[in-house]
Amino acid sequence: MDTAAEPRPGDEDFDGFRMRVSEDYAEYMLFVIGDKTDSSLPSLEVVRKAADRKLDELAKDYIWQREPFKLEAKTQKGLGLPYLHGITHYGDNVEDEWLIVYLLRELSKAFSQLWIRVSDSDGEFLLIEAAKVTPKWLSPENDANRVWIHDGKLLIIPLTDSTTTATSKPLSLPEAIKTIKTSPPPTLIHSPLVEAESFYRLEKYPAQITTALHHSLVTIPRKLAHILHARPKAVAPATEAFYLRDPRALKPLLSPPSLSPSTKQQEGGSSSLLTFPPTDLVTVSVRFTKVLYAQLRSQHFAPPPAWGPAMRAAEAKASAASAADAEAAPEAAKALARLEMGVKLTTGFELLARTAGQSASRVVREVALLLEDLVEDGGDSALPTDGEIARWEGAGREDDDGWMDIDFGDFERELEGKKTNTGESGFGDAAAQADLRKIVSRFEAFLNDESAGIEGAETEEMDRDDDSDEEEGSDDDEDREVSFDEEQFGRMMREMMGLPAEDDGREKGKAKAVEEELDEEDEEEESEDEEVRKLTEQMESELKKFGALELDPKPKTTATIKEKGEGSSKKKEEAEAESSDEAIDIDYNLAKNLLESFKSQAGMAGPAGNILGMMGMTLPRDEDDSGDE
């Protein structure tokens, strides 16, 4: 395929980033570099097939959040050799990106002539992981195309190569390939410390591939159970369709029951309009990733009208069990929760099925073909029976979802390295504990870094320049640099606010000196202020004449407080009253706008819900209004 790759930092024709792809993608390039006369030099097709086999071996049942790992042959002008290229959008699941890095590192161990580079929207993200230990000369301005994976190792092309002279100039991809071809292996930098930090997240692989999955029992239509059994990876696009649902796309599903003769006999009325009507429900085990399960579970969603009878029956059963039999109550509550999850998942498939035939995703197009086959095969007669469903692999499996519940007391104790209330020594699974401790240790190291400034940790060169001007350990000088004069700050604030200065003997000398320096400027400004004041009074009198200012029966202090010298005590009282009134108005308007914004979300994600969630507040859904609609 002779398609040129997009220019990137360091290329001659690079003119900046454009909005071509979203910010949640990983890009990878695989080059076979070696002597063409060498018979052991693998072809790109051999490498691609080996990558496919490795993917099946490691992650055959893995569910990609948005796009799977894929490779295709490409060529680029100026490189002189073809390569394998791929881009994977991983959405909200960053684990997809690290699975790709792990897969590529393992693949590099199988081919000694294989050189791989991987980046994302942040650039060389492997160096970002090792930012604390990277060499000082390496910066975001010159790190492009310098990081490579070869033979399972992380290698860095140094600045002292033969292709560039300016230390701040980024390295182009052709220059990087030329350096790899012509330079002996020892020329490239292999730092075990940088490599350990860059590949730190890979330590939990390959076990993380199965740990990231979550099985849950959900109650869904038998037709959907058949589709999921045939294409289990379709749960990812369906969940995303529900999670990112558009209110306009939901409108056909939320329409009131039809009263036409052909549909009024059906339960819910609008079931005939649905691809997966809730008429034949079964409970099956569905395989999610933890991210997909959390996205589905965390959403508040009012069931479509067609699901009303089933939901009301489940709620009534759960309520009756809770009142009559304490032992049966948990099972009834679980049945209701499974049905709620089934409503969300089925809604996602409803949204997905409407445009499945035109989708760019292979698995979504396969769902469309399966639906067509069901129609050709006689519809419901081709669906699996209860006995067949019971014999499916993993039938009845339900994993514990306690990992979604966070005890913030245990969380704080984990940060301090203490045991939880239950006596366990960790928060979450082992991988979460390790990541959490690493984050805390890095943050503490930054806080304890005396060389760190406002812009972050300063370089050694900057420290040496500072030390050359002042003696090391001059604590008094440092204290003077960051000293804070409260009296001077208070005086400045009073002057800016137009308040009379305090009668303090210590301030008189300073104030007098400042006044003398500003006398000339004040004289020039007085004439301008006087003109502005007269114009303001004229406008105010005209507005009063026509009653434009009579908006509030209570007099405002705008007309009473005009000059500093008129009734200082009265001015202070009126200013305080005005400030109080304004604060009340602002708080009322803020609360009103916040509630209206939350109400307009209609139970979906939105800015008001997110803000309240960050403050630890949860508003109940507007059940009355939703019912009226």
Image (tube, grey):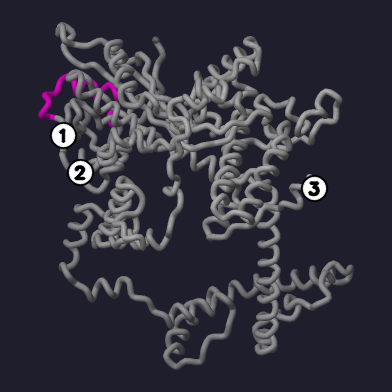
Residue marked by disc 1: 189
Q: State which tag comes first along the sequence, 3 or 2.
A: 2
Residue 43 lies, with reference to residue 312, above or below; the image says above
The amino acid type, in three-letter code, at marker 2 is: Pro
Count residues near mark 1 (Cα–Cα under 10 Å), then give few for <14, some for 14-19, many for 20+: some
| Cα–Cα gap, marks 3 and 2 | 64 Å
Q: State which tag comes first along the sequence, 2 or 1.
A: 2
Q: Position of residue 223 (x, y in %)?
A: 61, 24
The image quadrant where one finds the C terminus is top right
Q: On the picture, is 417 further left or further right than 269?
A: left
Which SS type dominates the magenta stretch? helix
Residue 359 among magenta residues: no
Residue marked by disc 3: 628
| Cα–Cα gap, marks 1 and 3 | 68 Å
Residue 441 lies, with reference to residue 393, above or below; the image says below
Q: Check disc 2 and report its element: helix, strand or loop.
A: loop
The amino acid type, in three-letter code, at marker 3 is: Asp
Label of residue 385 in the image? none
